[in-house]
Amino acid sequence: MSKIFWYVLGKFARNFLLCLATVLTIYLVVDFFEKLRKFTKYDADLSLILSFFVYRVPEITFLLAPLGALMASILTVGGLNRTREITAMRSCGLSSYQIAVPFFAFGLFVSAIGFCLTAVFIPLANLQAEYVESVLIKHKPEALMSAPDQLWLRIGSEQLLQIDSVKQNGKHLVGLHHYTLKEPFGLSEIVEAEKGLFINGEWMMDNVVQRQVMNDGRVAITEQPHRILPLPLTPEDFQNWLSHSPKNMTLDRLKGYIERITQDGHNPQRYVTNYWARVAFSMVPLVMTLLGVSISLRGGGGRTVGAAKGVGQTLAIGFLFWAVHSVGIVLGQNGAVMPIVGSWIATVMFFMVGANLFLKLK
């Protein structure tokens, strides 16, 4: 590799890290103060709030990396133009392609990192962030196992709740089994109910059978028509647990889930669209690098791009891309177009624009 390659690559890498750190900090600060009022209602410790945002950093970085790549490419080429280094490179016989190779190499590297993040690390971090928010901050029961036909919850340190199934958008619980434990590990009480309904803000169990375990080992059985279940959860919590959010699945697990629900005869469009959208979005940093370099190199190196103009161009292009990408996702999820087409349409469209501009460079 030539010294020019490493020189340009170093400048672009520094500008990318600076731009990414800037937009990431702005996003986190705004999001922090927006959620701070919500978290302080639960008397959450500052350390828990900070840990929540630490787990959110991988996904936010993944989403903002294209913006950082676009802004850094525009500002880097603008800086090289301002110091006449682009003109000097061309005077030495370097073509636009040779000048742009360091940008494309780093853009490809960022895209590869982004793919690794969205394939494995982001889903795991999202699960930890949800755990911190729901269990540690909002003090809701932890879901030990969640599936459409079985749900285990831990309530406090001495109670377990098993639910056979959840129906009617989380408002109807079927087959309740509430276990109260005692030290050393043993059963103190078992309460079973045929069903539980969410009425007037609380859970009401029907056809209840209570089994109280005495100290001598005998069991006292009591039957009740109704009984309140002390469960600090709402129907929305059950919906979230059982909805299998695609963002919390690794790509490998999501692919397996798509195959399973397809075999069961369910519509997989939402999950297929999300799968390809995550793959396509990981390539956007490279596309934005191509677009930024192509725009900045137009004019034969005679133009200079100031910071204000570079930021303005970045925001305009970024907004346009996000609008097209969002529309494509909606069309794919609704079946208006094939999921893979809706997921890739924005990435392919902007790549074609960037490649066309680059090929027209002098």
Image (tube, grey):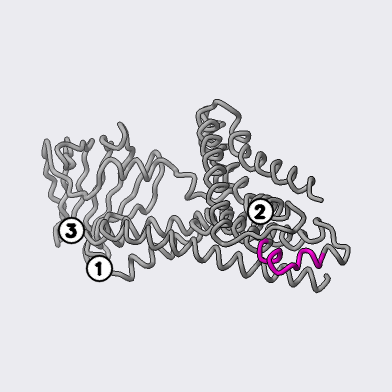
Report the side of 103 relative to 97 (left or right).
left
* Position of residue 198 measured from the top left corner of the image (x, y, whole percent): 20, 38
Name the residue beneath numbered marker 2: 292
Whether 83 is among the magenta residues is yes
* Position of residue 308 measured from the top left corner of the image (x, y, whole percent): 54, 59
The answer to whether mark 1 and mark 3 are in CB contact below 8 A is no
Q: What is the distance, in whole Å, between disc 3 and disc 2 at their CAs?
A: 76 Å
Query: Which residue range is magenta in the image?
Result: 78-89
> Is 205 situated above or below 82?
above
Q: Amino acid at mark 2?
A: Gly
Q: What is the distance, in whole Å, between disc 2 and disc 1 at their CAs?
A: 65 Å
Name the residue rendered at 28%, 38% in the picture: 175
Name the residue rendered at 74%, 52% in the picture: 299
The image's mark for residue 217 is 3
Q: Amino acid at mark 3?
A: Gly
Which of the two discs, 2 and 1, labels the residue nearer the N terminus? 1
Answer few, some or many: residues within 10 Å of disc 3's Cα (few below 14, many 20 plus, some between 14 and 19).
few
Name the residue beneath numbered marker 1: 184
The answer to whether mark 3 and mark 2 are in CB contact below 8 A is no
Which of the two discs, 1 and 3, labels the residue nearer the N terminus? 1
- What secondary structure is the stretch in magenta mostly built from? helix
Answer few, some or many: residues within 10 Å of disc 1's Cα (few below 14, many 20 plus, some between 14 and 19).
few
